[in-house]
Amino acid sequence: MKGDLVRPGVKGIVEYLPGKTPTEPGIAKLASNENPFGPSPKALEAIAREAKNLHTYPDQKSRLLRDALAKKLNLMEACIICGNGSDDLMQIIGATYLNPGDEVVIAKNTFSVYELIARIFDGRMKFVGLKDYALDLEGIAAAVTIKTKIVFLTNPNNPTGTIFGAAQFDAFMKKVPQNLLVVVDEAYAEYVESRDFPDAIKHIKEGRNVIVLRTFSKFYGLAGLRLGFALGKQELLAPMFKTKMPFNVNRLAQAGGLAALGDKAFLDKTFMNNVEGKKYLYAELDKLGLDYKKTEANFIFIDLKKSADEFFAKMRKQKVIIRPLTSFGLPQAIRVSIGTKEQNEKLISATKLCFLS
């Protein structure tokens, strides 16, 4: 075939590399920040009931789920859109708002899908380094130009677990132009303990061009169903209903997500396990003299100061899978998910063997 059918911008895309998923028994997978308890029991019951309806299409606009989210978050239903995971919603944002050549400002050493979206839609990326492993909002604001269309912010940041505070975010919103689209990815918001965590929804209610992304993949234990939602003012989300694929959220995801929202016992158990797991891991990592960041998410960032890929291979032999952060531009750092008590203890035992060997 003569010529090249692939768009030039696609050639520069690096394929996304997920955390390794083990197939053999006895593995502690602590690489992908999944809920260690699995799905919500109420979600599983709802999914089983809904399975009998798989011969019919799902609700195109996920109305029942959006109605429940609207009541929970004190927003209008029109201010919520659901997607096949928050990654899907990012692609919908790109399809709706990014023109070729538009600037997209992204932090370095963060979730790679923001860059992927910019590349897919031929945007021009501008990267701003972290400050003490946290997003530098002052630096990001300074990087904005008249050509900037979207700024992606992650709070808490993946992979470092750090957050920016309410005053920082308010100051940032005052500095950036009103016509800029600020996308705040809050995939791990439900795990946050800090009272200084910003209320990004406040800026939506004030009419700013802010879209907040949330997911059912982490806290709610439904990563395999692929379900996320975005919050924003009605004028921002209405065009996104046009660019999203029809029926992008399947029946099982809608039913499971709706039930998971109301499973308070499961959600409380998930939160407290994370709180207790952090305390245990901090104490053990301190004993080992490892350099880590205290986290507001369900994972811990550790700077090994030596090859993360080599450390990953050693840990894999001990039947523990962690995430080397080479693909995040941090080749000497790892990210470890907070698991059950037993998984955390196995992680520490393996770390002692591998780090000190």
Image (cartoon, rainbow, N blue to C red):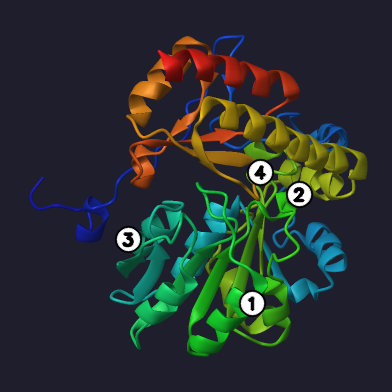
| Closer mark to the observer between disc 1 and disc 3 | 1
Pick the residue in front: 166 or 258. 166
Pick the residue in front: 287 or 310. 287
What is the secondary structure assignment of the residue under circle 1?
Answer: helix
Nearer-N-terminus badge (3/2): 3
Is residue 54 visible in the rendered image? The answer is no
Q: For the residues labelled 1 and 2, say whether their Cβ atoms are less than 8 Å apart.
A: no
Pick the residue in front: 82 or 158. 158
Q: For the residues labelled 1 and 3, say whether their Cβ atoms are less than 8 Å apart.
A: no
Q: Position of residue 73 (x, y in %)?
A: 82, 67
The kind of residue on which mark 3 rests is: Arg
Q: Residue at x 52, y 24 (%)?
A: 21
- Give the numbered dot on residue 219: none
- For marks 1 and 2, give the CA distance: 35 Å
Residue beneath disc 4: 217
Nearer-N-terminus badge (4/2): 4
Nearer-N-terminus badge (1/2): 1
Residue beneath disc 1: 167
- For marks 4 and 3, give the CA distance: 25 Å
What is the secondary structure assignment of the residue under circle 2?
Answer: helix
Residue beneath disc 3: 119
Q: For the residues labelled 4 and 3, say whether their Cβ atoms are less than 8 Å apart.
A: no
Residue beneath disc 2: 254
Q: In the image, 44: left or right of 351?
A: right
| Closer mark to the observer between disc 1 and disc 4 | 1
Q: Position of residue 18 (x, y in %)?
A: 46, 36
* Image: 230 above or below 133: below
- For marks 1 and 4, give the CA distance: 29 Å
Q: Position of residue 321 (x, y in %)?
A: 51, 22
Q: Position of residue 24 (x, y in %)?
A: 55, 10
The kind of residue on which mark 4 rests is: Ser
